[in-house]
Image (cartoon, rainbow, N blue to C red):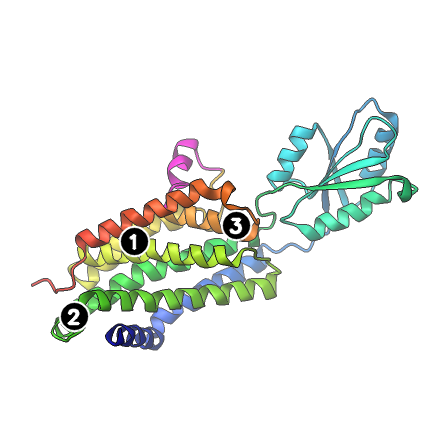
C-alpha cells in the first residue's frame, strides 16, 4: 500500500508542477465556461406562458386577451398536449389550464429548470383571477431540458475536462516516461506494475474531481446554476474517469513516441469534442448522425449529468444511458488491458 500511495502523491506533485497541464486542465475550461456563460447570459424579464382553454369560452378568452396585453408575458394558446410538450422542450416557463366552467380551479404546470421565471409568472397569472380566494391553483411540475444555455453548458464543460485529462494527460505522461526510461527504472524497484498504474489513475481522478469542484462552485456563484443529487455527480465523475483514463492507457499503448500521442488522441477526442453535445445540443443534427453521436461516451456522460444533476431525474428515467456508459467503461477497460504495456518499446 505504501508504494501505491507514494506513486499517487508523486504523480500529483508532478501534475501540479506542470504549468501546461494546469493551464489546459484548470484554467482553460474555467475560462471557456465564464466567457461563453457571460456572452450567452440574458437579463430579459420575459415569461413564456402557455394557455390551454376552450376558445368558445368567452370568459376564458377575455382573460387570455388581458394576459396578452402584459409586456412581461409571451402568451401562446394551444392544446394541452402541445403546450406541455413545449414546456418539456423549454419553450414555455409556465402553462396554465383554464376549465370550461367557472374557473374555481386552475391547473398550473411549472418548469423546474427555470424556477424564478415560473414563480414570477405564477404571481402575474394569479392577478387575472379575482378575487383570488375563490380560485384554487393546483401546481404540477413537468421535467424539462435545461432552460438556460449555462445550465446546458456546465455539465458539458465538466465532461470535456474529464475527457481531456483522461486521454491527453494520461497518454502524454506515460509515453514520455517510457521514452525517458523512467518506467524501466520503476519496474526494477519493488513497486508492482498495478501499483504504478493505479497510483497514476488515482492522482488524475483527484485532479479531475478538484477541477469539477471549482467549475461547479464558479457556476453556482456567478451564474446561479443549481445542482441536485451530489451522489450522482460523484458517481458520474468516477465512471467518466474510468472511461477516459482507460482510453488514455489505450492511446499510450499504441503510441511509440510522444509526437504520435496528439495524432492518436485527437482521432478519438476531436470528434467527441465537436459532435458530443458539449457546446450545443445535438437536436439539429441529421437523424442518422444523431443516432451515432448520442451514443458517444462524452455525450452520454454530459446528458446523464444534465438529467440527474441539473434536472433532478431519478434512476428509472436515465437507466438506459447509465447502462450505455457502463458498457463504454467495460469496452475501454478491455482495450486498455489489451494494448497497454509498462515496458518501453525497443
State yes or no: residue 346 in magenta: no
Is residue 174 visible in the rendered image? The answer is: yes
Tell me which segment is drawn in magenta. Answer: 284-296
Disc 3, SS = helix
- The quarter of the picture where the C terminus appears is bottom left
The residue indicated by pointer 2 is 183
Query: Residue 308, labelled with which disc?
Result: 3
Disc 1, SS = helix
Disc 2, SS = helix
Q: Earlier in the sequence, mark 1 or mark 2?
A: 2
Residue under the point 24% across and 65% down: 197
Q: CA distance from mark 2 to mark 3?
A: 41 Å
Nearer to us in this view, 314 or 16:
314
Q: CA distance from mark 1 to mark 2?
A: 25 Å
Q: Earlier in the sequence, mark 3 or mark 1?
A: 1
- Cβ atoms at labels 2 and 3 below 8 Å apart: no
Query: Which quarter of the picture shows residue 58?
Result: top right
Q: Position of residue 193 (x, y in %)?
A: 18, 66
Residue under the point 61% across and 47% down: 147
Nearer to us in this view, 331 or 162:
331
Query: Which quarter of the picture shows residue 259?
Result: bottom left
Q: CA distance from mark 3 to mark 1?
A: 29 Å
Q: Position of residue 176 (x, y in %)?
A: 20, 68
Q: Is residue 70 left or right of residue 304?
A: right
Q: Position of residue 162 (x, y in %)?
A: 39, 59
Residue under the point 30% across and 50% down: 268
- The quarter of the picture where the N terminus appears is bottom left
**Residue density around tag 2, few if under 14, some if 14–19, many if 20 or more, within 10 Å:** many
The residue indicated by pointer 1 is 266
Amino acid at each position: 500500500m505504501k508504494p501505491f500511495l507514494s506513486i499517487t502523491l508523486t504523480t500529483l506533485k508532478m501534475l501540479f508542477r506542470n504549468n501546461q497541464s494546469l493551464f489546459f486542465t484548470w484554467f482553460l475550461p474555467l475560462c471557456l465556461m465564464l466567457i461563453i456563460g457571460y456572452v450567452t447570459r440574458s437579463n430579459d424579464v420575459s415569461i413564456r406562458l402557455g394557455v390551454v382553454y376552450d376558445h368558445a369560452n368567452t370568459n376564458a378568452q377575455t382573460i387570455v386577451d388581458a394576459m396578452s396585453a402584459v409586456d412581461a408575458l409571451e402568451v401562446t394558446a394551444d392544446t394541452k398536449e402541445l403546450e406541455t410538450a413545449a414546456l418539456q422542450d423549454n419553450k414555455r416557463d409556465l402553462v396554465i389550464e383554464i376549465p370550461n366552467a367557472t374557473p374555481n380551479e386552475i391547473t398550473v404546470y411549472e418548469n423546474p429548470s427555470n424556477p424564478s421565471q415560473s414563480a414570477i409568472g405564477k404571481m402575474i397569472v394569479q392577478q387575472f383571477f379575482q378575487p383570488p380566494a375563490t380560485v384554487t391553483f393546483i401546481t404540477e411540475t413537468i421535467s424539462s431540458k435545461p432552460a438556460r444555455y449555462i445550465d446546458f453548458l456546465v455539465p458539458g464543460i465538466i465532461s470535456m475536462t474529464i475527457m481531456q485529462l483522461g486521454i491527453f494527460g494520461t497518454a502524454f505522461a506515460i509515453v514520455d516516461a517510457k521514452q525517458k526510461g523512467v518506467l524501466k527504472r520503476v519496474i526494477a524497484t519493488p513497486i508492482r506494475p498495478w501499483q504504478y498504474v493505479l497510483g497514476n489513475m488515482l492522482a488524475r481522478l483527484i485532479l479531475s474531481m478538484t477541477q469539477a469542484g471549482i467549475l461547479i462552485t464558479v457556476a453556482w456563484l456567478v451564474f446561479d446554476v443549481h445542482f441536485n443529487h451530489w451522489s450522482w455527480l460523484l458517481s458520474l465523475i468516477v465512471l467518466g474517469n474510468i472511461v477516459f483514463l482507460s482510453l488514455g492507457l489505450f492511446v499510450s499503448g499504441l503510441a511509440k513516441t510522444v509526437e504520435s500521442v496528439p495524432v492518436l488522441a485527437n482521432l478519438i477526442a476531436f470528434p467527441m469534442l465537436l459532435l458530443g453535445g458539449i457546446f450545443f445540443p445535438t437536436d439539429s443534427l441529421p437523424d442518422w448522425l444523431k443516432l451515432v453521436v448520442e451514443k458517444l461516451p462524452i455525450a452520454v456522460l454530459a446528458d446523464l449529468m444534465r438529467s440527474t444533476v441539473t434536472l433532478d431525474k431519478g434512476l428509472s428515467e436515465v437507466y438506459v444511458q447509465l447502462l450505455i456508459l457502463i458498457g463504454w467503461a467495460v469496452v475501454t477497460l478491455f482495450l486498455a488491458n489489451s494494448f497497454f504495456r509498462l515496458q518501453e518499446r525497443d
